[in-house]
Image (spheres, rainbow, N blue to C red):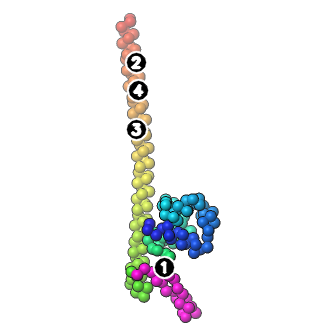
Amino acid sequence: MDYFASNIKFLRERNGYKQAELCSIIDFKQSTWSGYESGFSKPNYKDLLKIIEFFEITASELLEIDLANVNLTENLGMAEKGRNVNLKVNRNVNPNSENALKEAIKECQAKDALIAVKDQLLHAKTQLIESLEAQIKLLQNQLDQMKYTIEEKEKNQHTQRKDRKTA
């Protein structure tokens, strides 16, 4: 999440929102959003999805690309011919090289897929932990019941011995 904080601030400002205004739209506390923008806190999965959906951006773009340094410029001479857009990204990507751009897209898609798999694994892990915790509670209850039963039997046996001695 190298660029997360700067990117959400950039996206908010680019879209003309003040923090309070944006927070009321996407249902965040302003203190939470401020923490995200300042880099003092990181979003949970649910909040991250809200942000991605609101700004209509991929997780890779939001987390791994410095959006403030991506320049979209319309080629005004070509505007009537089909509105060509030139994209200048980091020094690593040559916008004129179709292969380089395809590679960058593939890399982002692969990272998005990895993030999705990671999220699925985390969700499965959470479900497994919850299931194991429930099983532990059930076993603890069974153990407590067995202890109670043993204690009751011991009390009964002790009482029977006592009654035999007095009889």
Give the mark toward the camera: 3 or 1: 1
The quarter of the rendered structure image containing the N terminus is: bottom left
Residue 130 percent across, percent down from the top left: 44, 48
Q: Determine whether 46 is above or below 140 in the image.
A: below
Whole-number angstrom distance, CA of label 4 to CA of label 1:
71 Å
Answer with mark 3 or mark 2, whichever residue precedes in sequence.
3
Closer to the camera in the image, 101 or 41: 41
Q: From the image, tell me which residue sits under label 1.
A: 70
Residue reaching furthest top? 167
Answer with mark 3 or mark 1, whichever residue precedes in sequence.
1
| Residue drawn at point x = 43 percent, y = 85 percent | 95
Which stretch did the figure color magenta? Answer: 69-91
Q: From the image, tell me which residue sits under label 2.
A: 156
| Residue drawn at point x = 50 percent, y = 76 percent | 68
Q: From the image, tell me which residue sits under label 3.
A: 139
Location of residue 64 (image quadrant): bottom left
CB-based contact (under 8 Å), mark 3 and mark 2: no
Q: From the image, tell me which residue sits under label 4.
A: 149
Q: Amino acid at mark 3?
A: Leu
Whole-number angstrom distance, CA of label 1 to CA of label 2:
81 Å
Q: Is residue 142 magenta?
A: no
CB-based contact (under 8 Å), mark 4 and mark 2: no
